[in-house]
Amino acid sequence: MSEWMKNVRKTEPYVPGEQPKTDNVIKLNTNENPYPPAPGVRKACAGMDTDRFRLYPDPDVTQLTEAIADYYGTDTSEVFVGVGSDDVLAMSFLTFFNSDKPILFPDITYSFYDVWAELFRIPYKRPALKDDFRIDINDYMEPNGGIVLANPNAPTSLYEPVYNIEKIIKANSGSVVIIDEAYIDFGGESVLPLIHKYDNLLVVRTFSKSRSMAGVRIGFAMGSPLLIAALKDVKASYNSYTMNMPAITFGVEAVKDDAYFKNTLEKIINTRNRTKAELEQMGFAVLDSGANFLFASHEKMPAKMIFEKLREKNIYVRYFDKPRIDNYLRITVGTDDEMDAFICAVKEIKENYVCVFQVGVKILSVDQK
Ligand SMILES: *Cc1c(COP(=O)(O)O)cnc(C)c1O
């Protein structure tokens, strides 16, 4: 072993869902939005003045910060923009979690949290979710170095009401509480109004799911001006130009088109509710989803088997081989056609049933044998 190797920072990286290299796949494994971004994004892309690329982008991300502040009715001093919410969250861990006391997050949640804690050498503790996968707020009443909660939670899809989250924020005025609202647009009520009441609350959001822009990488945080100023200082000590010029422009366009945004959300929520009912009819237990995905398990068919058989049919869902959740599938809500194909394929796995569908295009027919 080379001597320098003992000085290498060892990390166990986060493993994202598979991004297949071909298009002929029904992709329900990374909670992407099945609909395109707002039409204004396409126009802005086509009309992009690429000569401007020779210049550095605005380090303050002024235009997009203003658009977000305007949309959510906050001050620009309460908004921080980053390269997807993963960047915003990582920066927040680095900025706010510097205590000797452990930070707290549930045993089952977004699997990046423990990766960042390890990377930044932040001590952490993971209180177990209750048997119904809900948080026990009493677990978050002990001394800690910070708290991070995804609401709705991933991969469970469960939404925790504001009054419960508020109890946690209120009881922990001595540490920063981060609420990761990656999925809040799909029906939950946000804790955002509370940023004016509690200066220790940071709300993190993303354009990746509800605004169909995972490929552009935009995330943001909203909180008291003191929190945001601290984040900006850390960011400027690390990389001044995180947001590239096209991303800033596309982000502004996406925020402008509220009608398109609301319409996309409504379609996904309707498709989600219909798919949940259909899965339940087939004997699945499906958790109440406040997100753009469903978390489901079947009484007779092992999740891993379903996952593998669906994959053979070019339908990708997410399976986590982890304690407590290794008999669940996480299924992203796609278009109605995609969910029809998915439901049909599950029927085919379950019983004597034959589906004819063409992935990537439209289902041709769904016939019983
Ligand atoms: C998807 C997701 C993120 C990260 O999204 P970005 O694409 O980095 O904005 C953060 N938190 C949760 C809970 C997520 O599901």
Image: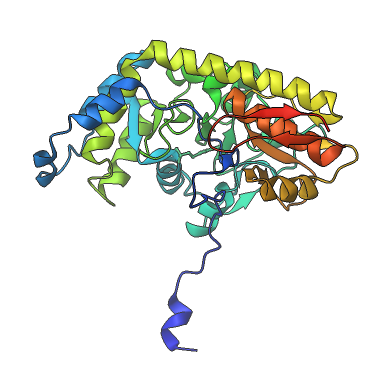
**48 and 359: which is toward the camera:** 359
**220 and 229: which is toward the camera:** 220
Looking at the rendering, in which quadrant would you find the C terminus?
Answer: top right
Which residue sits at x=84%, y=37%?
A: 298
Q: In the rendered image, is residue 66 in sight?
A: yes
**277 and 100: which is toward the camera:** 277
Using the image, determine if residue 32 lies above or below residue 112: above
Q: Quadrant of residue 154?
A: top right
Check the image and name the residue furthest to the right. Answer: 300
**270 and 367: which is toward the camera:** 367
Q: Is residue 239 left or right of residue 364?
A: left
Q: Where residue 22 sits in the image (x, y, percent)?
A: 49, 49
Using the image, determine if residue 175 lies above or below residue 68: below
Figure disc tally? 0
Q: In the rendered image, is residue 291 in sight?
A: no
Q: What colouring does the structure picture have?
A: rainbow
Which residue sits at x=17%, y=40%?
A: 57
Q: Where residue 129 sits in the image (x, y, percent)?
A: 75, 38
Q: Where residue 23 sits in the image (x, y, percent)?
A: 49, 44
Check the image and name the residue furthest to the top. Answer: 259
Using the image, determine if residue 189 lies above or below residue 293: above
Which residue sits at x=68%, y=24%?
A: 289
Q: Is residue 127 left or right of residue 124?
A: right
Q: Is residue 233 left or right of residue 13?
A: left
Q: Is residue 367 left or right of residue 28?
A: right
Q: Where residue 306 sits in the image (x, y, percent)?
A: 77, 45
